[in-house]
Image (spheres, rainbow, N blue to C red):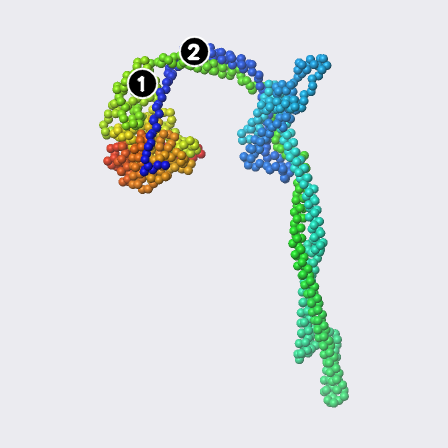
Amino acid sequence: MLDYNQPIDRTGPEASQRKPQAGFNVLELANLLWRRKVAIAAAALLGATLAVVVGKSVTPRYTATAQLYVDPRELQLVDRELTPRAQDVSGMSMVVESQARLITSNSVLLQVIQQAGLDKDPEFGGGGGTSLMSSLLGLIGLHPRAPSAAEKNEVQLAALDALNKHITVRKTEKSFIVDIEVWSTDPAKAAMLANTLTNAYLAESRNSQASAARRATNDLSSRLKELRERLRNAETALATYKAQNNFVGTQDALISDQQLSTSNQRLSAARAATMDAQARLDQIEASRRAATDAGAIPEALQSPTIANLRAQYADARKKYAEQAGELGPRHPALRQTEKQVEDLKRTINEEIDRFAQSAKNDLTRARDFEASLNRALEAQKRQSVQLSQAGVRLRELEREVDASRDVYQSFLKRSRETEEQESLNTSAARVIGEATVPQRRSFPPAMSLFAMIGFIFGAIAASSWFVAVEILFTGATAPAPTPARPQRTPAPDAMRAPQRAPPPEASPPQPASRIPEVEQVPPELAAPPLQPSMVEQPLIEKPLIARFQEADVIHTLGAILATGGGVDLTRLGWPTLRPGFPLTTLLNAWRDMRAAVARRAGGKAMPVIALVGAGETTGRSVTTLNFALAAARDGARVLMIDADHRARSLSNKLIRPSKSEPSRLGWLSIGNKDAREIKTVNGISVLPAAEGDAGKAAAAIRKAIAQARSAGGYDLVILDGPAMPLSAGDCKLLDDTDSLVAVLPTSLDVNDSLEEILAALGPAERKLVGVVLEELTPAIQTRQRGRQYA
């Protein structure tokens, strides 16, 4: 890949020469056909007669139509169907189309062949009737051998192929209606076959559902025995493990767990009883140690013995008090009463001591009972821990049993459901229109149409014959050339080379017997050579004006229509020139502009022209692209450079991931790898915009132009830009150009735009050779129109 420092050895391809085409005068064609009108009319009548004869000889066909309603939703007879139902519209449409294809399946058509006996019908390839040889053999007592199975199969396949050609299935758009059309040479047979086909399809649909349910039942039943055995083994393993590890209990809990809970409750009660006995003993001991009456404890108050002794003690005290007032201290009766009081008091204390001893005994017994319960609870705890460790395996076995039981129950239930579904018909397809015997044939059409077609083809054939004969036998003596109309079309070859074309009178005389090929070209396709009056123009000319309108272009879809054959400038999504119109007002004006550029270039091998504009840069870039396409159509080798380093409209259109083709890149570049020359299929080389500021970009463009001029591979250089306002680098770039063309969008004020351009150009306005009024639809309207068609 070359750069500025490498030597350049490049020669451009020669321009393709335009071949003259011979035309045929419409007036002469009309005169020729008028002279042969009798023969043409006779040929047309002959063609109509032959068409009618052919139509009469064609075997008529009769078409019978039956209508089916195929509902993909089917009937909801059970909760769980074998196949899921289509819910969305696309899925329903696919189901209906599948059913339409099922109508013409081999299984359905074979049923129709067997029911209607088509394997013996001659129309469908069967051997109907008795042959002459069979009749003669029957007269002498001989019977032909029965056909073999292979022969029957071959006849059946032939009938199947013929019946498939007689059937047409059409699905009505946006509906569930299917039309079944069957044609035959017999109208009654056509109706019979259509009805037989619909019945065979409905029977096949029912049989397929029953067969699917039957297969599902067999598959499920074959698995039930294995699942039953698996469940039995899992339950046996669970019971054995429980017996080995003493897992005995109710459905809710084990006995060990229940005993542990009961022992824990009893231990809690025993501890409470021990604490109660201890509290009662402490109370009795405290009462005995205190100076208060020991009989005030609850046990003493509730004891009848203590109550009786205390009553006696009270009576004795009372008696002692009475005697002490009457008798002396040494009186025997008083001493006896005093002794009786002491005895009763001692008896009460002894009774209270027995209560204390009883409380001690109760406390000892409660402590012993609590200790025994505690020992039993510890033993049960150790046993519970052991059972908990064994319970891990127990729960695993229980899960296996539950899973096996669930699977077995689900298979058993589903097997019973599918077994019942064998006898159910859930299809919602039904016949909504039976086929009737057709009253009119479907082929061939009416004889009047045959006659009309034959008449037209006969007339066309005769006319084509006379025209061909006229061209073949009169081609050696060409008619005198018609005088060419004066046109204003400058020769595009003026830009192909710096040399001037010699005037017509300087060319050597041609022989009188030969007519130049240029004269055979129609006037609207041949551009006359550049006249001397057009060449000899003053240096400063009045700028030409061209109108760039919607009628001159076509709109493409950009990358949607792009092909893989190379970069095509007509597929960028921008409006481009219409093909096939070489002499339009716009193209003639642009030819005049290029001729003015060639004159102002002063003999330079590669003139440089820049298109500048005001307002939106996209319109200027579109005009530049079409200006280059027009020059390439006229045979010029064009180098187009994007000189607008700010907007980069043309570069952004070309340099995209979907458009980059490294194999099409050329040798020329503007300082970096991204701005390399791009070869296109339109005969135009494009140099994208350079990177950097305006000064560096302009310097790179000038250097690229100099390199291209030294290589000599181009006839014309077209600059897209620079954009307004102009920088110092842009002004220096315009000083190096040979001519300028101003692009004025009509969406803005034309006078203001032109004044803005002239003010920005300054002294360079003398290079202005033309003005293009860009009248294309603004981009915003184009986008709105595109959204309307999206």
Q: Which mark is residue 37?
A: 2
Residue 681 badge: none
**Three-letter code for the amino acid on which mark 1 is drawn:** Ala
Label 2: few (<14), some or many (≥20) within 10 Å? some
Q: Which residue is at a point 42% across and 14% down the rendered structure image?
A: 468
Camera-side residue of 268 and 342: 268
Q: Quadrant of residue 680?
A: top left
Q: Considering the image in quadrants, where does the C terminus appear?
A: top left
Where's residue 614, x and y in %? 31, 36
Question: Residue 318: in sight, yes or no?
Answer: no
Instruction: Tell me if 744 is positioned left or right of 42 in this view.
Output: left
Percent of width and height locating residue 225 = 70, 42
* Disc 2 residue type (three-letter): Lys
Where the N terminus falls, by quadrant? top left
| Residue occupying image coordinates x 63% and y 39% | 80
SS category of the residue bearing label 2: helix
Which residue is labeled 1 in the image?
484
* Residue displayed at 66% across by 34% down: 210
Q: Secondary structure at mark 1?
A: loop
